[in-house]
Image: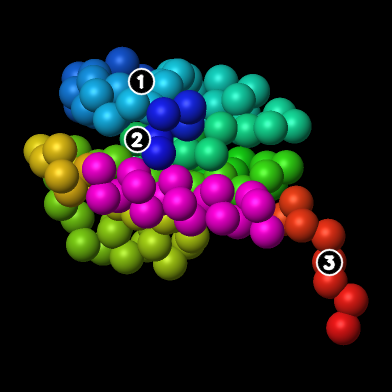
Amino acid sequence: MLHGITALLVHNNSELFVTLKAALEHQGLRVIQAESRAQAKRVVGVQKPVPLVFTDTHLPDGTWADILALAGKAALPVNVIVVARLVNTRLYIETIEAGAFDFIVPPFNAADLAHVVRCAADNVLTRRAAQRRPAQSV
C-alpha cells in the first residue's frame, strides 16, 4: 500500500531524521529530503507535490508553520507531520490546531509509525481522489 508513495523530510541534518528516514524506507516509502523551507518549496510548490511531508520544528529559514503554509498552497492535498525531539503538549496542540496531520516524537516504534503513515497516506490519497472527481450536479 505504501510502496510508490514519496515522503519529503524537511530538516537541517538532524540525527533524528536519519533514524526516521530509515524507518520510513523500511515501510516501503520513497524518501527525499530538503534542508530548508526554500528547498521544501521547490518540492511542494510543483504541479504534483509529494503527498507526505515530515518537518522538523525549526529550520534555518523558518519553522514547521512555514512548511504547513506551503502545503496549504499546494496544487494537491499534502499532509504534514511535525517531528519534535521531545514531547511538548503545547506545541502538539498548536500544530494540530494549525492543520498538521500529526505530531510525532522519538523513539519511532515501527508499529506506531506505520499507523501514522498509513492514516496520513490514506487520508491524503482520498482527498486527492476527491479533488480529481468532477463536481456532481444536484
The numbered disc on residue 135 is 3
Q: Residues within 10 Å of mark 1 (few under 14, many from 20)?
A: some
Amino acid at dot 1: Asn
In the image, which residues are magenta?
114-130
Amino acid at dot 3: Ala
Residue that protrudes farthest toward the right in the picture:
137
Residue at the image point whose x is 29% and y is 59% from the top: 92
Q: Residue 24: image x %, image y %?
A: 29, 29
Q: Which residue is mark 2?
A: 56
112 horizontally vs 61: left or right = left
Amino acid at dot 2: Asp
Residue at the image point whose x is 42% and y is 55% from the top: 101
Q: Quadrant of the N terminus?
A: top left
Q: Residue 138: tell me if it is visible.
A: yes
1 or 2: tag closer to the N-terminus? 1
**Does 116 lie within the magenta span?**
yes
The numbered disc on residue 12 is 1
